[in-house]
Structures are given as structure tokens and as C-alpha cells.
Image (spheres, rainbow, N blue to C red):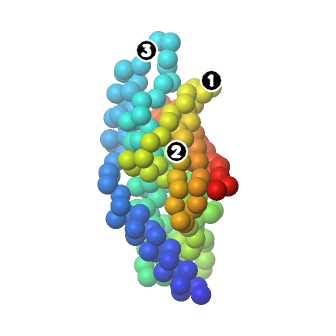
Amino acid sequence: MKTLMIVVVIGLLLQAVSEQKTIVQADDVKQAQEQEDRNQTGDKPDTFEKESVKMVLTEYERAFLAVVHDTNDTLKLNNYTTKQELVEYFQQLMSVELATSLVDAYFTEKKGGLFVVATEPPTFLEEGQPFTVTTNGDGSATVTQEHNNDFMGHVQVEFTLAKQEDRWMIIDVQHNYFDD
């Protein structure tokens, strides 16, 4: 049963990697954010453009999949040995709370290293599917997108992003499941 679960998880992760159409490097995200900052006007200091949102969320997906993809045949990570190292890596893109939650959910420390937990992957923004961006009163923004597939069912995903240290960061991801 364990082997089957590992095979399913690896299959899902490899499928997600193969379906990924856009790879955005961290420098590209920073450049887009700097351009966005230059384009903003005085009364809208923290507004989002859809492309900026897509870049931040695409980088989140790319970073997660790069870590998961860089494992050996026992799902041991090749470049990280502790959860703390991985949290620090993900903090480039997200709040420390979200990074800690992500690492705790998808990785485990065992004797001999850090391993991927055999479970469903996190939810990412689906390229090519419609989404909305809502600017919140506190300067953050919520990106909302519906997903409907056999694996997760019908769910609305909400990514909350906020500006921290002059960079847009993901601070929360929520799932609202529909009863179909």
C-alpha cells in the first residue's frame, strides 16, 4: 500500500511538472514587481495587475515542484536536510507562517534526511483558467479561482498576497469546497 501511495504521489507530481507551461525565475518576478511599482499611481499604492499575480503564483508552483522533483528514489530531498532550511527557502515567496505550514504538510525529517510526504500536492493557480483579483482594504489582494477535477472535487481556492519588504508575498491559501 505504501509503495502504491508513493507511486501515485510521484505520478501526480511528475504530471504537474510536465503540464507546467511557464517557468518564471525569481529575478523575473522581482522585475515585474518593480515595474508594477513604477506604474502605480498615488491613490492606489498596492494595486495588482493580473500578470503580476500570475507571476508570483507561478513562481510558488515552480519553487515547490523544483524541490519535490529533486529527490532520490526514496523521496529524500537532495538539496535540503532540515525543515528549517526548506522554510527559509520558501520564505522568498511566502510568509513564514505559510512556509512553515507548507513544509510541515509535505515534508518530514527522518534519520538520514528530509523526505517528501506521500500525499496530494498543494493547489496552484491553474494556467489558462479564469481567476479574479480583489484588492482588500488592508492593501492585500485575494486571487480566487475555481478548480473542478476528480482528485480534489469542486473547490474554490483563495490565495491572499500582500506586500512585504517591497515584494508581493503569498500569505495564505484557503480552500472552499462545494457540495456537488
Which residue type carries mark 1? Gly
Q: CA distance from mark 3 to mark 1?
A: 17 Å
Secondary-structure class at tag 2: strand
Q: Residue under label 3, please give it.
A: 41
Q: CA distance from mark 2 to mark 1?
A: 20 Å
Quadrant for the N terminus, please. bottom right
Q: Residue under label 1, please give it.
A: 137
Where residue 137 appears, as percent x and y from the top left, is: 62, 23
Q: Nearer the viewer, residue 138 or 31?
A: 138
Which of the two labelled residues, at mark 2 and mark 1, occupies the earlier sequence position? 1
Q: Is 144 above or below relative to 21?
A: above
Quadrant for the C terminus, please. bottom right
* Residue drawn 57% across the image and 48% down it: 157
Q: CA distance from mark 3 to mark 2?
A: 27 Å
* Residue drawn 35% across the image and 34% down it: 32
Circle 2 crowding by C-alpha within 10 Å: few under 14, some 14–19, many from 20: some
Instruction: State which quadrant residue 161 falls in.
Output: top right
Circle 1 crowding by C-alpha within 10 Å: few under 14, some 14–19, many from 20: few
Q: Is 63 above or below relative to 11?
A: above
Q: Look at discs 3 and 2 and give the one toward the viewer.
A: 2
Numbered circle sitting on residue 145: 2
